Image (cartoon, coloured by chain):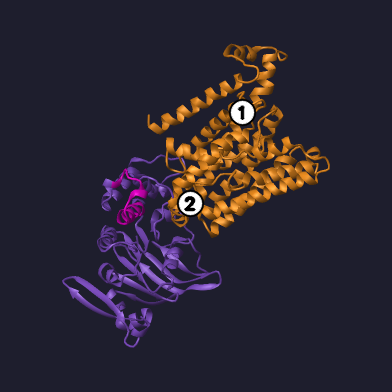
Chain colours: A orange, B purple
Amino acid sequence: MTKSMLMQLLCLLALLLTGIFSLSFGRVSLGPADLWAALSAPANDPRAIILFELRLPRVLLGMLVGATLGLTGAALQGVLRNPLADPGVIGVSSSSALGAVIAIHLGLAGVWSLAVPAFAMTGALLATLLLLLVSARDSSVLMLILVGIGISSLATALISLVVNLADNPMTLQDMIMWMLGSLENRTMTDLLLALPFILIGWAMMIGVGQGLNAISVGEDTAQTMGINLMWLKLRIVIGTAISVGAAVSVCGSIGFVGLVVPHIARALISREPGAILLPSAVIGALLLTLADVITRTPLASSPLQLGVVTALIGAPSFLYIVFHTRKDMR
Amino acid sequence: MTGLIIKNISLTLEGSQILKDVSGTLMPGEVVGLIGPNGAGKSSLLKSILGLVHPASGTIELDGGNLITLPPKERARMIAYAAQGSPVYWPLSVERIVALGRIPHLTPWQKPRPEDEAAVENALLMTDSAHLKGRLVTTLSGGERARVLMARTIATGAPYILADEPVASLDPYHQLQVMHILRQQAKAGGAVMVVLHDLSLAARYCDRLILLHEGRLIDQGIPDDILTPQNMAHVFSVATSRWSQGDDHFLATHPLPGKTEVL
């Protein structure tokens, strides 16, 4: 077995263990025996209610969203050939959150159950397309980040505007939820709403690895190797928009996971952009599950926000990566 | 293999005409040099053959068939490209870079087969880079990097190789080394078309030259017939002196009489 296969297995194992730990951890602690008992307990058993209605949707959703952020971060970094690309940094997540907030405030959620995810995906799609257009003209790391900051700030400002203009103003909690992300109080309904779109988004990116490897020696050269560049980019842009949009519509915009995860995957598994897609999904799920566990540690009187935890891990990593890659920046 | 035949291609990009009615051939066993001043359309001619840009008119024939309608993967197995400047965007290992050359032969999920590994090994040997296999491409010197990227091109195993200024920014020794590698490809039955700015290298390593100027074909033929004082004065606005030493032919450029004041 190669080192990279071993690492991938270890990551999967860590994900499984962290998931089980996350199910048992919280205000009411469920030991292994309780978890086991809850599986066969009647539906009104408190242990079963905590497990199936409170913890399981949260853990599964955290894994799905984490995997989405990890996968799309790796795919975006690969296709933009940019180590700082990530749905959060480049403004895709916040544009997506803007879409969701607009749908909620126009009252569309009551009319059409899919309005929120649909608007969130549209926001993500517009931001991703804009970035792709910019990177076609100027592919420098700096340009992408500057445009990303622009998109991100504009989307955040517009979210505030929508909230201000709303007839029944949103609470501060809602604002935090959209801007920093949260997994609190999520139900199976939320999970089932996002799941199909997240899976469709992932499916669109199946098989892009070879193309991502090829464009690491330039877009022209990749095309001369028989790679259909347009199709490669389209699949990643639309796959990212659909899966990130769906994730944001139920969890808000969670930052930095997509940025950090591919770097961990490169360090542990492979330097090839095509080889770290799946590992990035697994590590993303692991990282977000861990971050969610941290939000529930009784450090403060009230639970920590998930986005605060990921930013506390992510923002210093972002700076580290910037300093580490600054000689490659143009 | 019956060669690559370019007939009367014209190319317009963003409103300006880049190539006007250009024709030329590339036959197995030969190294053809594409020469001409900056902006003459040399890179655009290579890109037209590679399908990266689409000529408005004209035909390109490969081994008797229409190249333009050939599916991209099949074209990729026939024609390999060495891009100008050879960029690499991630710190990949030399072995993995060279292995990228096998992509035209593999489906997205396929693992490299023994023949793919053999082609990679062979390309590393041919370019004298086998000892660099485990190194990261970011740690290589300019000369090593040029060889490794050439190995990527050769690993494709394509009978036709198109190289865009492969010796730019290399020191004299490494220029000769890269030209020698291309010469070896032709000797083994391949066909090489190479964009060169160094007219002396063009004189020494190319069997034939294609001279372009402002998007038009000025002349093509053996170096002796192309590198004439008239052509050089007309196209490059330079005077030349030429001499031979054994089998090697040399060429040096000077300012045209009366043009010294602009230098």
Residue B235 showing in the rendered view: yes
The residue beneath circle 2 is: A227
* Labels 1 & 2 near each other (Cβ < 8 A): no
**Magenta region, main secondary structure:** helix
Q: Chain of mark 1?
A: A
In the rendered structure, the answer to whether residue B152 lies left or right of residue B107 reads left
Q: Indicate the secondary structure of the residue bearing disc 1.
A: helix
User: In this picture, which residue range is highlighted in magenta?
Assistant: B132-153
The amino acid type, in three-letter code, at marker 2 is Ile
- Look at the image and tell me in which quarter the N terminus of chain B lies: bottom left
Please, is residue A216 above or below residue B161 in the view?
Answer: above
As for residue B135 lying within the magenta part, the answer is yes
Q: Indicate the secondary structure of the residue bearing disc 2.
A: loop
The residue beneath circle 1 is: A295
Residue plotted at (36% across, 61% down): B163
Residue A269 showing in the rendered view: no
Query: x%, y% of residue B87?
Result: 41, 55
